[in-house]
Image: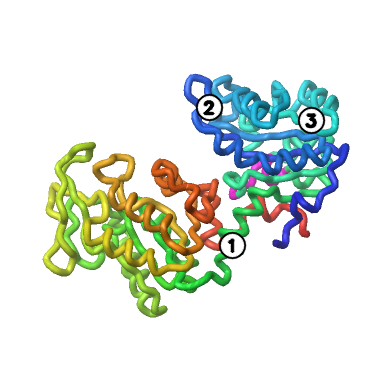
Amino acid sequence: MSKLSIRDLDVQGREVLMRVDFNVPLKDGAITDDTRIRAALPSIEHLLKGGAKLVLCSHLGRPKGQANPEFSLAPAAARLGELIGAEVKLAPDCIGDEAAALRAGLGAGQALLLENTRFHSEETDNDAAFAKQLAGSAEIFVNDAFGTAHRAHASTEGVTHHVTTSAMGFLLARELEYLVGKLESPERPFLVIMGGAKVSGKIDVISNLMDKADAFLIGGAMAYTFRKAQGYAVGDSLVEDDKLDLALEILKLAEEKGTRFLLPPDSLVTNEFKEGAETRDSGVFGEGGAIEDGWQGIDIGPAGIEAFVEEVGKARTIVWNGPMGVFEIPTFAKGTEAVARAVAASDAVTIVGGGDSVTAVNQLGLDDQMTFISTGGGASLELLEGKELPGVAALSEA
């Protein structure tokens, strides 16, 4: 890894500003899932054990540049305190005299959480003066918030210009290890499973991985854009009509490169978008299968499940991003569940990349059976697209 690591730092008695991702879900002021706080614990505990005066900063929700108690990090400060067994004070703001005084009062091995950085519009504008205030008297900056590393914000990129040293935390390093390092020369066969609604949202990932992957499995609504482009009837299924030519180009490119590009041979279809709705199989496309008007595809069908599960079983490296259908509705979740269980049971290095596929894996209790689960939706997609993330590019070289 070309960037400086948290392991390389001497933090004894020094103020360290650390960007974490405490953007946790709240209900009635209580945290409903503390996964993101727990994910930051290895880096936090390492720095505190090393004697750092640790100042943590994060955003929460979208307060649109205004202080809003609904988006306060107070519950996160309380939960972190419980997890590390020590008080974590919350500064009333992320900048200003009170925050500076609390920072100055920190002892070695103590932690302070600054209030929501997005209470200031200057955060997302990456304003230099704001970034300087946020950096304060810290000599060292550690970024462990992978989920926001694709944003050039004051707390991810701007602060690096106002400290001596910037390093990646354990979480960020692990994301880069799997989403970049492990895919540079993957164990083969290398299978990419893509789902979700839109071809347009995944085109750059498909293009970037086309040279590396041995096979693609395409599920979700994006499959219907490909099927319509091939001339099949897809009824009322979700289709990007302006991307039909692009879909054909992708199919042609896969053929030219000798990459197997597998679409679901059939679909589960419904005439009503709700739990318990009537469903049926479309039949196999190319063998008389079709989706009638008034019906829409909402999951891969029985033949699709069988074919996809078989393909997963052959792979030695798997990247999965996006569900196979509308898995939020149990009636339409069989395809996603079958693929998730097959991935979990495989002997492959399994990398689940952000967003809905992570939600599906967690809901099924399969998270501990995957090699690696990414904590960032947009950030993981951009890495899979081959892009450099601003929050990573700004860190000091090793």
Q: CA distance from mark 2 to mark 3?
A: 23 Å
Nearer to me, 261 or 246: 261
Indicate whether residue 152 is drawn in magenta.
yes
Residue range highlighted in magenta: 150-158
Q: Is residue 19 visible?
A: yes
Image quarter (top left, top right, bottom left or bottom right) of the C terminus: bottom right
Q: Residues within 10 Å of mark 2 (few under 14, many from 20)?
A: few
Q: Residues within 10 Å of mark 1 (few under 14, many from 20)?
A: some
Q: Horizontal placement of 344 versus 165: left or right?
A: left
- The x and y percentages for residue 6 are 75, 49
**Eye-nearest disc, 1 or 2:** 2
Q: Residue at x 85, y 29 (%)?
A: 107
Name above or below for residue 102 compared with residue 343. Answer: above
**Mark 2–mark 3 CB contact (< 8 Å):** no
- The x and y percentages for residue 46 are 75, 42
Q: Quadrant of residue 60?
A: top right
User: Residue 95: which numbered mark, if any?
Assistant: none
Q: Residue at x 85, y 33 (%)?
A: 108
Q: Residue at x 19, y 50 (%)?
A: 269
Nearer to me, 237 or 181: 181
Q: Horizontal placement of 229 versus 371: left or right?
A: left
Q: CA distance from mark 1 to mark 3?
A: 34 Å
Q: Which badge, 1 or 3, is on the more N-terminal residue?
A: 3
The residue labelled by disc 2 is: 31
The residue labelled by disc 3 is: 110
Which kind of residue does numbered mark 1 sit on? Val
Q: Residue at x 26, y 61 (%)?
A: 304
The residue labelled by disc 1 is: 180
- The x and y percentages for residue 7 are 77, 51
Tell which residue pokes out farthest to the right in this image: 13
**Eye-nearest disc, 1 or 3:** 3
